């Protein structure tokens, strides 16, 4: 394949993938709408809110998993961790520090010089597009 054919094939595949993603999303939603309540009820009958259970639909046995997602109140958690002994806070808490790249690039030279040793720039990905 020459480069033009590669770009055309890539565009075709991107379109097909997009269509399939949309269709998969619709099917997943229909499966959720059909079986979620039954799975949740089966879990609750076992005294659980989350986990894996088995349900029967027609003559088929299905394995259903209801996963949990935990979201922490950042402000409240920060206050709680600050009030803990430092060793406990370090053990249980996790802190991520970063500097917004736009703020870094617009910072005065004195600030950028201080931050520079902490900054690493790596390749984040690669794309190439055909121009008309």
Image (cartoon, rainbow, N blue to C red):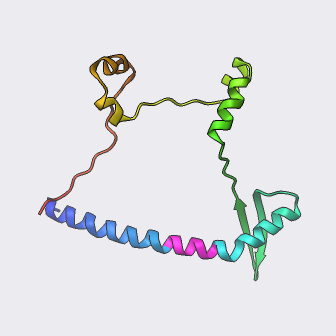
Q: Quadrant of residue 35?
A: bottom right
Tell me the quarter of the image containing the C terminus.
bottom left
In which quarter of the view is residue 30 placed?
Answer: bottom right
User: Where does the image place residue 110, in percent across and percent down from the top left?
Assistant: 30, 17
Q: Is residue 13 above or below residue 47?
A: below
Residue under the image location 45 percent in, 31 percent down: 98
Identity of the residue drawn at 36% across and 18% down: 117
User: Which residue sits at x=62%, y=39%?
Assistant: 74
Residue 28 rendering spot, x and y as whole percentages: 58, 71
Predominant secondary structure, magenta span: helix
Residue 2 visible to the viewer: no
Q: Quadrant of the N terminus?
A: bottom left
x, y percent for residue 78: 65, 31
Left or right relative to 67: residue 19: left
Q: Is residue 75 left or right of residue 48?
A: left
Quick one: 77 or 21, which is closer to the camera?
77
6 sits to left or right of 85: left
Q: How many marks?
A: 0
Q: Percent x, y for residue 6?
A: 20, 62
Which residue is drawn at the image coordinates 66% and 23% (left, top)?
90
Residue 90 sits inside the magenta stretch: no
Magenta segment, which residues? Answer: 24-31
Q: Residue furthest front?
A: 108
Nearest the eye: 16 or 96:
96
Q: Is residue 95 left or right of residue 111?
A: right
Please tell me which residue lies in front, 111 or 10: 111
Whether residue 106 is visible to the viewer of this picture, yes or no, is: yes
Q: Is residue 109 above or below residue 125?
A: above
């Amino acid at each position: 394949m020459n480069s033009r054919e590669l770009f055309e094939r890539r565009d075709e595949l991107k379109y097909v993938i997009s269509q399939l993603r949309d269709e998969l999303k619709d099917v997943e939603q229909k499966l959720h709408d059909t079986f979620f309540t039954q799975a949740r009820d089966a879990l609750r009958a076992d005294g659980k809110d989350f986990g894996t259970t088995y349900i029967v639909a027609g003559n088929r046995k299905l394995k259903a998993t209801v996963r949990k997602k935990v979201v922490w109140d950042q402000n409240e958690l920060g206050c709680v961790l600050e009030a803990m002994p430092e060793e406990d806070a370090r053990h249980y808490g996790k802190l991520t520090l970063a500097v917004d790249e736009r703020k870094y690039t617009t910072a005065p030279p004195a600030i950028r010089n201080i931050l520079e040793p902490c900054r690493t720039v790596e390749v984040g990905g690669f794309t190439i597009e055909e121009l008309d």
